[in-house]
Amino acid sequence: MTCWSAFACIHAIFFTCVIIVVAEESTSASKVVSVTLTTEWQLTLSPSHHTGHRFSKATSSLLEAAEFFADEGDDQYWAFVEDWNESGEKDCQGNVYEYLERRAASEETLKVFTSIPIVTFYGAMGTPCFGHFHALLKSASAQGQVHYVHRPVIMNAECARKGCIGLGTHVDTIGIDGNVGRLHVVGYGVELAVKNMEYKASDDSIMNDIGALLLAPIASESHDSLAFEVVKGFNFSRLNYRYPELNRELTSFRHYLVGKTAEDETLKIWDIKDLGLQATQRILLADDPFQMMMDISQNFPSLASSLSRLDLDSTICAEIENNQKHVSPGSLFMSINSEPIELDTVDIFTLADKITSEIREAARFRDIGLGSTAVRELLRLRIAPPGSELNFPRLNLFDSTTVPIISFNKNIESDRNYAHWSPDIMQLMRHSQLGQVPPVRRNMFNVILILNLGQSNSWRLVDALHEYTRAGVPLRLAYVLVDDSEGDTVKELWNPTSFLTDFAEFEEKEELDINFPRGLSLGTVIGRAGNLILRRFGGEAQVDFVNEVANARGVMFPGNHFIPAVKSKVTWSLVQKAFTRIFIQWYSKVDSVDSDDLVAPDMTKVHSLIDAHVANILSLAGATESEPGAYLSEAKALIADKGVAAPSALVNGIYFTLDDAERLGAEMEQVVMHFVQQEANSIAEAVLSGVLSNEILDKYPGGIFGWLHRTAVAKNTPFIVDNVKYPPTYVEMRPPQDNSEGLLAYIENCDVKASKGNTLWVVADAGTRKGMDLIASACECAARTRADGESTNSRVAVLHPPGVVATHRARAVALVSRWKTGYYCGNYSTFLSEILSSDAPETIKSALSALGMEQYASDSGMDDEELNTLLEQQGNFVASLIGMDANDSSESGTDSIVIANGRVIQIPTGYHMDADDFALLISKESSARGATVRNILESHSPVIPVSSSFNIFDQYMIACSLVAIRQTKSVSRSQVRTLESLESKHSAVIVQGDGVVVMDAVLDPLSKEAQRIAPLFYVLRDALFPHISIRIILNPRRELMEIPIKSYFRYAAPNPSLDAIPRVHFSQLPHHQTLTAHLDVPEAWLVTTVVATYDLDNLKLSDLPEEQDTMDAEYRIEALLVTGYCSESGAKDPPRGTQLILGDAGTVVMSNLGYFQLPAAPGVFELSLRPGRSADMYVFAEHVESTNSDVLLTVKEEHSARDVTYSSVEIIVSSWQGMTTQISLQRRPGMEREDVLPIHRGKDKDGGLWNKIISKWRNAKRSRLETINVFSVASGHLYERFLKIMMLSVRRNTNNPVKFWFIKNWLSPQFKDILPHIAAKYGFEYELVTYKWPTWLHKQTEKQRIIWAYKLLFLDVLFPLTLNKVIFVDADQVVRSNLKELWEMDLRGAPYAYTPFCDNNPEMEGYRFWKHGFWQTHLAGKPYHISALYVVDLETFRHTAAGDKLRLIYETLSKDPSSLANLDQDLPNYAQHQVPIFTLPQQWLWCESWCGNDTKTAAKTIDLCNNPMTKEPKLIGAARIVEEWTSLDEEVRSFTKQLEEHLLADKYVFTPPVRALS
């Protein structure tokens, strides 16, 4: 028997959110806003799409409990189904909770049969009609007759609805539309923001005769509304305690005082500046800080005045000030067990899933005998930050073969220039200037640079390090100079000033052509010359030679604060002069030393020698036929053998490449100095902890250089080290439950008492030479010792590959591996060497005899059958471990796998992995986590379970692999900030529990994030304490200049009572301020309004008439999002423009990260490529990975490239969080050079005359029939009123068919309902579109700025690819001309066209900000355009990736709150240099604010721009400015009124007509 998640089969798609704004009786001082969120499903039943049976759309708490056990495992689920004892609706909640507590960790096991018929039973446990069917199916399943699948749903039968199954279904509740039985949803927030009414933007409709809607008033907050202590001098907490019978009256009085405070008092700047500190103090001193944090953050506009009068506590302020030396004021972050949580997207579902996951992972650690303290420490192990040493190998390139090739330029310990420095490393403890390297006379900072100096930009690194050494930084430098003459792919360093070097490059080319032989690269001759200097005179001479060349370059650009200096390129002439000078200089030094004579050398002889060397350097003969060429070849061979490449660097052996530096967002010289400073800190820490002292260094082989390289490995192996190109995968290295037969037997070093903290499982066929080499290398590594004399602390188990026939030699290795180490310690390597040379039986017998195993040397000594069984079991174990078919021997690479502390390494074909590679692998995994895990376990003395067959080393192994898997699965790869440096005695809210989950946060209590997260902390504390610990360090902003929070907020958190209806309440709202409503929902929810009697953009409680006590609105969650990231196999860039389909929905893949999103319902879907160019070019790759491990993705293969059924990916959406996935596409054969986007038609604009004539004729013919697409956006009743007028004006003046496109996010329900009727009357098409703001794009929080952003940021993905052009027209615009003219205008290859701001209204000259300052400089003569009207050539827009460019520019600028003040205008104007704008003729847009009246008559459109000087409301100015506006308005309002009265009267109550304009 098995279980399928209840959510995916019983949850329907549509959900509804209901906002109820309640005005209490006129005698009450407060009005209340109440919000509930419900699902669309109810008692009305519908037949199943698949079976025809009728299911209820309702779910219940009992079924949610079943889903919890399904997540725990099949065994726990069936135990719950079997043992549930129906209580007949009596104490249902208690029974559910009791069972959850009792059975959550059940260990029962039931066998699952998969090769028998599947019978799916739909029903709910505990009901009378369930038991009989379940008993029959259980019996059949136990007998192997069927595979029993249970899908828990509520059926449409009376017996299926009795008892506890109804708990939480809310079947007795009635919604606004009269339907019953909706599931009420939690996990969302509602914001009522105080609206800026500088420009009056509301529709002044009469607020009486609205009609009656019979909804009872709803009470105020569910929590204690009198918890806030003092308002206007009244301590309501104490008054309520003394007079509990007056609670209602006190609450009303308090609400009155708070509301009056919010409306009547305006805070001065000196009242505002300390509000952050005052709010923090009030929270910290409260009896319930969590409740107080909620009250303050969610009601701040009403409480600000009271808080401003609070006297500050110096102790609290001092601690906050001290903490803000480590974190910036107002900064925010949060973590659960040290894994970062994104505060701007966190919701209750994310937190619940994460906490559940942490508890389940803790159980896995406890299974191996670890206590709670050790488990907590393991769960809190942090991922190493990207720039730390843990992500880079430490290599030692020095051995007997490398000494001549690598030589440092100085020895600081013996150099007389540093004689005045002290060798005492205690100097590291002294305070020095920030970033200054301490002057200690030891070889502490050793830098090796591996460069191809033929690359011009490599010299920037040389220049930078030369400047550091000249400034006194004690760097020891060594160069390994190579070239790319043999086809090495050496990456050119990026130069931000390359545009300055183009002219110099042209000038120098002539000199290169004259003096430099063709057929050689500059890198080759510099490499030869530099290596010759090195081998003759040493490292100091080589560094002098390189610096001589560097200093000889001329300065082309001196540089400034923004751009570094630019020097001319290196030429052979400069190299030759430097070579000659350095050779003479050092020849004289060396010759005088060798001859012990002061006589000057014979310069004629020296020059002859130089000429001979120059001839060899410039020789076109083979690389090894000349001395310089041989030296260069040896240097290249060295770095190839060590696994390093150019350009790269090593700082005390820490190896990194140019690619690594770019991933860190830094230049190579910056990374070098970063590691220099990091090494200084590491040495200081070692000295401080007593690990290192002068005495230790004086005795250590190699001194401090040897100590720094004590853990270094001999080589670098990219597939082990490079986690970007070779992402690591991990498995849980848990031994089989019964290892008594010796399935795993370990080969260890001779010290049987040594700790074996590293475990290697080598999957290799000992019957092959390749397998034996791998086994021998692993064993050699385990037996060796490090440079510091310590062993590698490793053990090796050899496992036979799955599906491989056992050979005589494989059986011999298996046999020997199972003998105790003491019998053949020291001889095992000899045994391997002997049988490695030959697999003949005689050789194996001889090797066994040499080990003292004579009894097995005879033919009858080895039990082949027993060993074959053992090897087969090993293969099965490996197959189950890595996830493959044990009987499939065709799997490639399964005979060359190494698993080290959980990490799976599949060795590349043809690569010989030697002992150095194994040492590197062990070192990397040990430094990443292994050593830390071992220290934690050793410090807490774990207990081995009595029933376990594993030992302490197995605990190390399992714990390491579990931690590695955990860190790999981590959603966030960022490094959480440590809070250890922050004080929390006086400035933190702490709840200390004894569980394994620890939540840490640094929070500004007056932030939008605090509004959202405070209620979550409150709920988690009450629900999970003491199983959870919470620490919130408050970090307020100081010296505030404005009110930090200008909105009221409530969060619908889970209610402890499963049968309670969740809702949120607003009280304490000001009556005369205008509020705008905004729903804060999880990222995966697509929400829209369905019913809203009042304008949600302009809510004003004082507008409610006396006889009307209710405002109501209904929201609906239309879909859950499937989001993902699409890549192309073998390509660097995502397949942008590719169209994907999920059900009836389609989307386009962005270039930004390959992002895509699609709407879906809970259930199973197929994600496919859209038929056409996308499906013709691509198929899904073989492996499809999901970022959610709980989501199943299955690639469906197609039978032929032309099959009608396209390749698809099966996706299961089974979570309120939707789904996030990663997919990979590969091109079809023959499509390697094709572009999925159509060819940009601008490329053909210069075709022949005949083509132009034909094209013009076709365009003329098409234009008579072509539909003109108009795009607009509106929010609020006023702008919807304008929008109707705009649509009518377009239809009156445009003869072509018109289709309007509207963003549906902010349209009111009334507008959406009457839109089909308006479209039918005036003859146009329309479509509503939406796109959810991507999580990776910097978010806007103000509603108006969000609307502005939607006008521009998603143009390439908002519309279907079949739409090639669209015209944006502002809602408050009146069109006076035929849009066909604008539609057919040639944009000259630009992706869009805008109208520039008018310049002929002199009264506004002072407001034209683009004529001076930043904008004047940035525009560089280009016009500043207005965003009220623009044409978008979508084909060009997509083909030129304009949307991706705009999003990148936006992402950079938007993080500065002072930039993009007018987002929809500033962004395209700022981006003109990257995304060109075609400037439309001025007459296409006229507005009174900026244009003179003399040009009004020629205007093709008139826009009601805001006037920053007069601030005249638009509704007043419209009739005055636009002559035809009144008649258009009356016409659309008359038609709207008819619709309201006759067609939609039963559905809505509408706002009556606006007052007549004077």
Image (spheres, grey):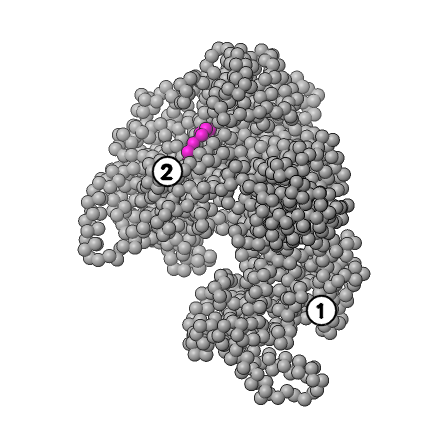
Q: Is residue 731 magenta?
A: no
What residue is shown at x 62% (from left), y 29% (from top)? 1019
What residue is shown at x 63% (from left), y 41% (from top)? 961
- Going by the numbered disc 1, the residue's amino acid type is Ile
Specify the principal SS of the magenta part: strand
Location of residue 760 by image quarter: top right
Going by the image, does 202 lie left or right of 104? left
Q: If you read the primary sequence from the N terminus, does the residue marked by circle 2 or circle 1 appear first?
A: 1
Q: Is residue 634 above or below residue 1028?
A: below
* Element under disc 2: loop
Q: Is residue 1484 above or below residue 500?
A: above
Q: Is residue 682 above or below residue 865?
A: below
Reading the image, the residue beneath label 2 is 1199
* Residue 422, x across and y down, in percent: 77, 67
For the record, the magenta segment spans 1161-1168
- Mark 1 surroundings: few (<14), some (14-19) or many (≥20) residues within 10 A: many
Image quadrant containing the N terminus: top right
Reading the image, the residue beneath label 1 is 412
What residue is shown at x 68% (from left), y 26% (from top)? 237
Q: Is residue 1166 magenta?
A: yes
What residue is shown at x 60% (from left), y 75% (from top)? 533
- Going by the numbered disc 2, the residue's amino acid type is His
Which circle, 2 or 1, is nearer the viewer?
2
Going by the image, does 219 lie left or right of 1356? right
- Mark 2 surroundings: few (<14), some (14-19) or many (≥20) residues within 10 A: few
Query: Is residue 585 among what the camera can see?
Result: yes
Location of residue 1093 by image quarter: top left
